[in-house]
Each structure stands twice: as C-alpha cells, then as structure tokens.
Image: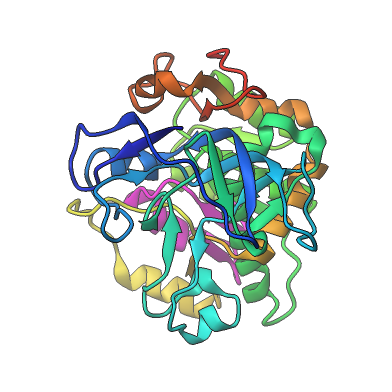
Amino acid sequence: MLALTVEPGRAGTLAVTEVADPAPGEAELLIDALAVGVCGTDKEIARGDYGWAPPGQLRLVLGHESLGRVRSAPPGSRFAPGDLVVGVVRRPDPVPCGACAHGEFDMCRNGDYTERGIKSRHGYASESWAVEPDYAVRLDPSLGLVGVLMEPTSVVAKAWEQVERIGNRAWFEPRTALVTGAGPIGLLGALLGVQRGLDVHVLDQVTDGIKPRLVSELGATYHSGAVDDVLARLRPDVVIEATGASAVVFAALAGTAPYGIVCLTGVSPTGRQISVDGGLINRELVLENDAVVGSVNANLRHYAAAADALAAADRDWLEGLITRRLPLARFAEAFGPDPAGDDVKVALTLGDDGSGDSR
C-alpha cells in the first residue's frame, strides 16, 4: 500500500512510498484511511528537525491527525465495520510511570512514551492502518471528513480542562476568554469557549479573509490590534495562548483579570530574545492569584470530550476550517507555502470516501 513517509532527521526525504499492508492482531481494528491533517509538527519532521522511526527501521510513516473507517473489528471490541474513527496519538511508556499507569499518558513523567507519526511508531498517513480498540475513538458518522479535526480538538479539550481544574481551586465563574492565534488550535479553542457560554475574543495578525469570518460566524469577536491594547480593554479571565510568540506569551501573563488563568498551547521557537519586566510579571501573578499552565497532547478523556464538542458544533463552520483538501499524491503542496496566505487546516485525503477537491 501507499504511505507518506520520511527519514527522520534528514530534510528532503518526504515521499509517498510503498509499505507493507497492516497485519492487525486478533484484538486490533483494521481501518481504511479517509484523511490525515497536516500540522506544524508534520512540517517540522519533514524538515528534519526531529522525529523518530520505529526501532530498527529507517523511515517513519507520518500522520497523527487521523480519520478512517473500520473495515474489520474483533468481537467484543465495541466497534463495527463502517464506524467512523480516529486513532489516538500517544501510547504510555512501557515502565510505566505513575501518570501513564493511571491513564494520564499525556502527562508522562519520564518521556518514554511513543507517538504515532512522531516518535517510534508509524503514523496514520497510509491507505490503511491497524489500531488497538482502546486507542480508537468513534465519531458521529454525520461529521464525515471534518472528523479529521478530532486530534487538534482533543488538544484544546485538554487545555480547557486544565483551566477549569485550576480555576476550581476557589470560586470560579469566568466570563471573558481571549484566544491568541486563529490557526486550527486557536479557532477550535474558541469553539470550546463559546460552547461553554463565554464571551470569546480571538486575536490574530490578519485583518480580513477566512479567519475573521470564521470567528464572526462562531459568535466571537475578532481583533487584529496590538496584544497589549486588546488585553487592556478586555482584562480576560482566561487566555488560551496558541501562537507561541514570546511577546504575546509574556503580555498575556501580565494582562489578565485578577485570578486569571493563562494556558499555553503554542510552542515557542528557541534562540530569540526579548526584554520583559520579570518583576512586574511576578508581581501580577502573586498579588492577583493568577496562574499559568502549559498543556500538550491529550489522553482518552480529552478525545471523548473532543468527540462531543465536534458533534455539537455547526457542521458548516467546521467545514470552513479545512481550507484545502488534497489527495495523497499532492502531498508536496500540503507541505509547501500557503498559496493564498490564509490556510487554516490542510487535509490529505485517502481512500474512496476522501475528496481531493483542492478547496
């Protein structure tokens, strides 16, 4: 079968290659792939920045934002042929650490976890794949191709869970949320904020086009001004930071309302220096009982929450997040420059149910 593979650590090795068909074990599902989403992590692996092939192998099958349809399922697995499913990305470490042993493998303490399409396990960008029933999540069949948004939605489901757990250390009734960044994580984070009944605001650099329209259609408010000005006007109770831009991160830490919570989901590049008033940030955090937390990946609880969030969302709005759909053979376009400059999510389609309409 065909798969999108790369030699980790070597730029220029991304290619569609022939790989062996999956050989599912007696207790595994066999899945016909429909689509995979392309994100910054995939592009970084393709550039040779990081990534790990399975032990003893040279190439890694990419793809961690999956979508497929069950071809066969073992008895008693709770799945049936035809079910729309996604595969969970991370697997607990084999030791396991305390967090992994309790199902919180997204919080692994020793770093010995594996991740499909990223670290030591083949991903989902192949014409078919196998997965353990405990690491597959069924989706509402009406979602169709937008189900490929499940993995990034699980990331923001965890982020919101972290915010709520921290907030509930005392009385917590947030009203205003600011999401910084209008990429897939930011827009899906805004969706979950709106679903919680909050007054949601989204900050990004562009002044027109797809992103402001999607924010408006969601019932949120879009901003493109300076982050300090937006924070001063809003004084948000919650900030979901999805840019990784250092200046935005540090502005958010000092710009919330008292008892504010900042959840960092964007990964900042290293090697860039900015000047910040550390004393002011510390003073704000301490005297206002503020909190900041980093959040990455997701466990099964977050995938379940993401499935519920997608099922409850407006289907047309979700469709608008997938700005380009390309067949697997056109992978180079998905990993290349954005031709219109306003991509949100690019999906590679596989199989008969996928539409490679290049939209």
| Residue 350 percent coordinates (x, y) | 55, 27
The residue closer to the viewer here, 50 or 219, is 50
| Residue 116 percent coordinates (x, y) | 45, 54
Task: Locate residue 341 relative to residue 209 in the image: left or right.
Answer: left
Q: Residue at x 69, y 41 (%)?
A: 71
| Residue 256 percent coordinates (x, y) | 55, 60
Vertical side of 265 occupied by 47: above or below: above
Q: Residue furthest bottom?
A: 98
Task: Locate residue 326 relative to residue 160 in the image: left or right.
Answer: left
Magenta span has 250? yes
Q: Residue at x 30, y 44 (%)?
A: 45
Task: Locate residue 8 relative to residue 301 in the image: left or right.
Answer: left
- Locate the C terminus by quadrant: top right
Vertical side of 175 occupied by 169: above or below: below
Vertical side of 25 occupied by 101: above or below: below
| Residue 291 percent coordinates (x, y) | 52, 72
Magenta segment range? 234-263
Magenta span has 75? no
Q: Residue at x 53, y 29 (%)?
A: 347
Residue 209 sits in which quadrant? top right
Residue 101 sits in which quadrant? bottom right
The residue closer to the viewer here, 51 or 17, is 17
The residue closer to the viewer here, 134 or 249, is 134
Residue 237 shows in this picture: no
Residue 245 shows in this picture: yes
Q: Residue at x 66, y 74 (%)?
A: 165
